[in-house]
Image (tube, helix red, strand yellow):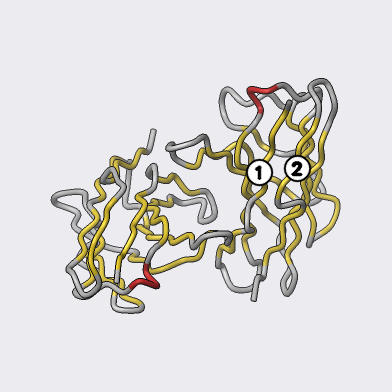
Amino acid sequence: GDSVTQMEGPVTLSEEAFLTINCTYTATGYPSLFWYVQYPGEGLQLLLKATKADDKGSNKGFEATYRKETTSFHLEKGSVQVSDSAVYFCGIGGTSYGKLTFGQGTILTVHP
Amino acid sequence: GAVVSQHPSWVICKSGTSVKIECRSLDFQATTMFWYRQFPKQSLMLMATSNEGSKATYEQGVEKDKFLINHASLTLSTLTVTSAHPEDSSFYICSAHSDSGNTIYFGEGSWLTVV
């Protein structure tokens, strides 16, 4: 079945540092790829997505590129802020759009 | 603001009792909703797909008689954990698939502690 392997955390950075959270997946066919974020006390929110190879999803300064050849969808941000502190989940979705398979989540803490 | 409301956010119950968690879409209709479970430091695992007006579809290994799902309307799905045991303590989160926008929205999640 489908699976997602996500960089283990927690990740602790200083403000304005560069962020990379690795995500690789195994799946049949060509899934859509997602990054979700969960802020303290809140539900999951879609951060960005990509639906086909070489697509780049971007939002709030975060970016991730759908790399079919390496089956990866790494999340990056050039300069993190304290407000980016949250748990980040990489997910893949197949033909049943709402049915998602998630990685284990990465806790990000950004210090001033 | 939240477009999917989950209630309660926190619940503590005694072993052997049942507890119900609600997932409600606030601004849209959702024929399909999903229930996930998350153990500490582990991923969100899909438990079941909730279909309005029909039986839920459970993932392999999930006991349908223990985790009762009812999707009685286009805006509400409920998960009832029956005869709860301490090992059922977990974080449960739902998502709703918007019928009109082909978009998924997640609830805030519910922490269940069984003592």
For the residue labelled by badge 2, is the local secondary structure a helix, a strand or a loop?
A: strand
Place of residue B36 in the rendered image (x, y in percent of width and height, measured from the top left): 59, 43
Label 1 neighbour load within 10 Å: few <14, some 14-19, many 20+: many
Identify the residue shown where x is 72% and y is 72%. Answer: B28
- Image point 21% across, 49% down: which residue? A71
On what subunit does the disc labeled 2 rest? B
Amino acid type, mark 1: Trp
Q: Position of residue A65 (x, y in %)?
A: 22, 65
Q: Residues within 10 Å of mark 2 (few under 14, many from 20)?
A: some
Q: Label 2 amino acid?
A: Val
* Left or right: residue B68 compared with residue A6: right
Q: Identify the residue position indicated by label 1 in the image.
A: B111
- The one nearer the camera, A91 or B16, is B16
In the image, farthest residue toward the front = A112
Count the labels in the image.
Answer: 2
- Helix, strand or loop status at disc 1: strand
CA gap, disc 1 and disc 2: 6 Å
Can you give x and y, in whole percent of width and height, for residue B51 in the image?
Answer: 72, 48
The reply to whether callout 1 and callout 2 are in contact (CB within 8 Å) is yes
Is B41 positioned to the left or the right of A13 in the image?
Answer: right
Q: Is B11 above or below relative to B105? A: above
Please tell me which residue lies in front, A26 or A62. Answer: A62
Q: Quadrant of the N terminus of chain B?
A: bottom right
**At which x and y percent is residue B79?**
76, 41
Using the rendered view, name the quadrant where residue B83 is placed.
top right
> Quadrant location of the C terminus of chain B?
top right
Which circle marks residue B16 in the picture? none
- Which residue is under mark 2? B11
Which chain does the numbered disc 1 sit on? Answer: B
